[in-house]
Image (cartoon, helix red, strand yellow):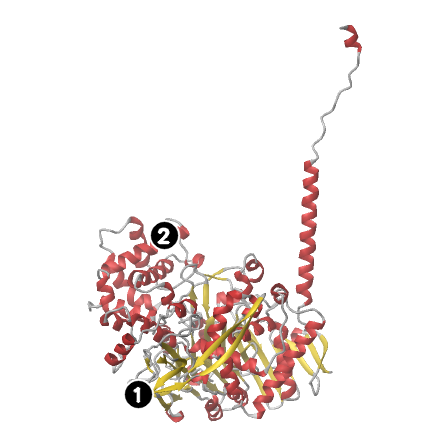
Amino acid sequence: MKLLAAVTVPSVKPRKKRWPRVVGIIVLIIVLLIACAGGYVYWLVNKSLPVIKGELRISGLEKEVTVWRDESGVPHIEAQSEQDLYIAQGYVTAQDRIFQMDLSRRQASGQLSEVVGAKAIDRDKFFRSFGLRRAAEASLAAYSEESKNVLEWYAQGVNNYIKQAKESKSLPIEFTILGYQPTEWQPIDSLTIGKYMAYDLAGNWEGQAFRYSMAQKLSPEKLQSLMPTYPKDGATIIQALKDNPVDLTALAAAAVTPDPFNGSNNWVVSGEKSASGKPMLANDPHLGLDAPSIWYETHLSAPDLNVSGVIFAGVPGIILGHNQDIAWGVTNLGPDVQDLYIEKRNPENPNQFEYMGKWEDAKVYKEEIKIKGEEPVSYDVVVTRHGPIISEFAKDQQQDTALAMRWTALDSTTELEAIQMFAKAHNWEEFKKSLEFFDAPAQNFVFASTDGTIAYRGNGLIPIRKKGDGSVPVPGWTDEYEWTGYIPWDDLPTTVNPKEGFIATANNKVIDDSYPFHLTDSWAQPYREARIQQVLSGKDKLTVEDMQKLQFDRNNLQAEELLDGLIGKVKNNSDLRPVDKEVLGLLQNWNKVNDPDQAAPMAYELWMQKFDDVLFKPEISDDTMKLFNNKAIVKDEMLRKSLQGEQEPWMDEKGGLEKVALQALQLAVDQAVSLQGKHPSKWQWGKFHQVDFPHPLGSVKPLNLIFNAKAVPMGGGRVTVGAAGWDSATGEVNHGAPWRTVIDLSDPQRSFNVVGPGQSGHLLSKWYHNQVDDWTTGQYHMTSIVPAIYRNAGNELKLIPD
């Protein structure tokens, strides 16, 4: 034992665990890799930022051009000839917006699958069927040599940029992410983008398709409630719809439908009603809200040309704006310029259709759709005497009956010709003359000039029909429903210097019942126009600040009309829950203004939304609902009639207004509770109703965190002058006025503007999202066409002939 005790046994220290050190090294490596990757991405993005100072050599220029970008990123292009001016405009716009431009021409041309893959095939087939690019090609031949030159010069400028960016490997990061490079710009690309905007603002084919679909399943009484008006020969037409059914399931599922709230506000005020003593003009076109904006603000200066305003990226010139003598703006007139024709196909030959008792050959366009990573897909577009077959682009093209569409914009039109003339007009007569060339889309133009004139014109090609009113599809196998021409140009609605001292439009009815021609029966809801009229008539002397405040106005006249009556219908119902009663109390005390920090607008807007579900489902599917483009007007009328005690079949079938209103209210309350908690007083409209200006790549997470703006609470709504349409499921504000402008003709060399979210399409540009705060709070920047002012920012770029 002593021996054992004498033996010294060395102590063994426990081995330290090495895994924390290993994990630390791994984490460090990952952090370094992320940092390197982030640094590379930053370098790549930064490398594609436009050169805005110094000198660049550009081929095609005759003389040096100077481009000054002001503090808001607006390019002021000074050239000594129109050739150099439009080459420079193409180059500069491409610097800021080339990815947007490329995506725009691809969407309109049906070429998205080539860069995003097979998920875009149906969309490509849809636009190939409509044939916007074919229509652009047909239009090009109608242009003057001067306008063709403008298109060529602009394309040359764009291609200068594309070539330089490819050589220097400085294309925007979006091209790297999607793994492709833009092809050369063609003049036809600019016209195709213009045709797409005409499509986005036309919007009555889908209503016809919707009513056609509903005619197959509804009683005559319920169908009539969905109609803007009953056709004069309604029994005959509706019987034709029933006798010749077309399966529109695929069309409804895949159709790319314009937003039914696409429209605008505009107004002009005479010098007698303005504080400055000169006319004022305000315009805020309502379209989708995206990054970058659909509008690109530019100032163009050359001998005999000095014009400032906005244009669609990819199109030369200025479509809305002012020069040193005049200002002009537009809203959507929205006439019936699209007709669907029911075509009977020859069972022995799928490319022949009956007309006046004979089989007639249709044109067949052989399309090849390129698909990223896959083999191309062949696709035939069939075009009858009335237009392209649009009912079966996603299905087998062998049905006995099909729908063809006739549309003014598929004819040869010359809007770019008018745009060039707008810029050089100095008075109403010259501006009116230019409108002879503006055919599609039909628009409400307002005009003001330094000579004191204010004017309005509803302008564009508007068909005259033998029979029918554009409300439903009509038989195409007979000549009974053909177009016989267009409303004569001299008979289009026109007003000059009215005694009221102002003119305003908001997609409202612009004619009275004495007007001898049919425009449409589907006008916008009247609330924006009514509020504009209310404000303009309520003050003797209006200021620029009044105009700006009105463009941002959030007074809800729909709530003024309907809310008290709806509350009266449900407030004594025994099925009301405590939370429902609390919500009704908030609504009763509401000032009817859609402010973002209030609870009542949240409750009201969700309540109105839930009427859709209670009234129209399950009879109308979600896909078919996309085609229901006059739904808001129909629903208003159903509520209006029911509040007045009139019979309404959709309402009566669901148990009457009291039951429907209670059910819709409780669905709205449940949704609000799930979103913002069970205490209605703490709800806020702006927490749900937010705008983030999504980028096309922002739909792919986590790219939304990089490309989209930070979500900002937004007031207003679909029926307020300060328009802010929203996604019914998410609350995302996706529609409104990407551009607002106010011009006082006492100083026509400046205008007050905001472009949401900003001028640039480049992620790292200081002008990418810099106008979000201004846009969401009703603020403006001043754009001057006075060199001494816009040059102050110091961003001088010289384009040198190469």
Residue ranking furthest to the top: 2
Write down the quadrant of residue 470 in the picture: bottom left
Whether residue 788 is visible:
no
Name the residue tied to disc 2: 680
| Left or right, residue 26 beside residue 389 | right
| Left or right, residue 147 beside residue 335 | right
Residue ranking furthest to the front: 348
Whether residue 683 is visible:
yes
Classed neighbour count for the residue bearing mark 2: other residues with Cα under 10 Å, few (<14), some (14–19), many (≥20): many
Write down the quadrant of residue 384 in the picture: bottom left
- The kind of secondary structure element at disc 2 is helix
Question: Which amino acid type is shown beneath numbered disc 2?
Answer: Pro
Question: Which amino acid type is shown beneath numbered disc 1?
Answer: Glu
Q: Is residue 34 above or below residue 99?
A: above
User: Between 324 and 637, which is closer to the camera in this rendering?
Assistant: 637
Q: Is residue 337 above or below residue 531?
A: below
Image location (x, y in percent) of residue 773: 53, 64
Q: Is residue 60 above or below residue 793?
A: below
| Left or right, residue 140 beside residue 406 | right
Image location (x, y in percent) of residue 742: 49, 77
| Left or right, residue 294 beside residue 334 | right
Image location (x, y in percent) of residue 532: 38, 75
Classed neighbour count for the residue bearing mark 1: other residues with Cα under 10 Å, few (<14), some (14–19), many (≥20): some
Name the residue tied to disc 1: 480
Image location (x, y in percent) of residue 21: 70, 38
Closer to us: mark 2 or mark 1? 1
Instruction: State the residue at coordinates (69%, 72%).
Output: 166
Task: Compare marks 2 and 1 and give the one earlier in the sequence.
Answer: 1
User: Between 173 and 584, which is closer to the camera in this rendering?
Assistant: 173
- The kind of secondary structure element at disc 1 is loop
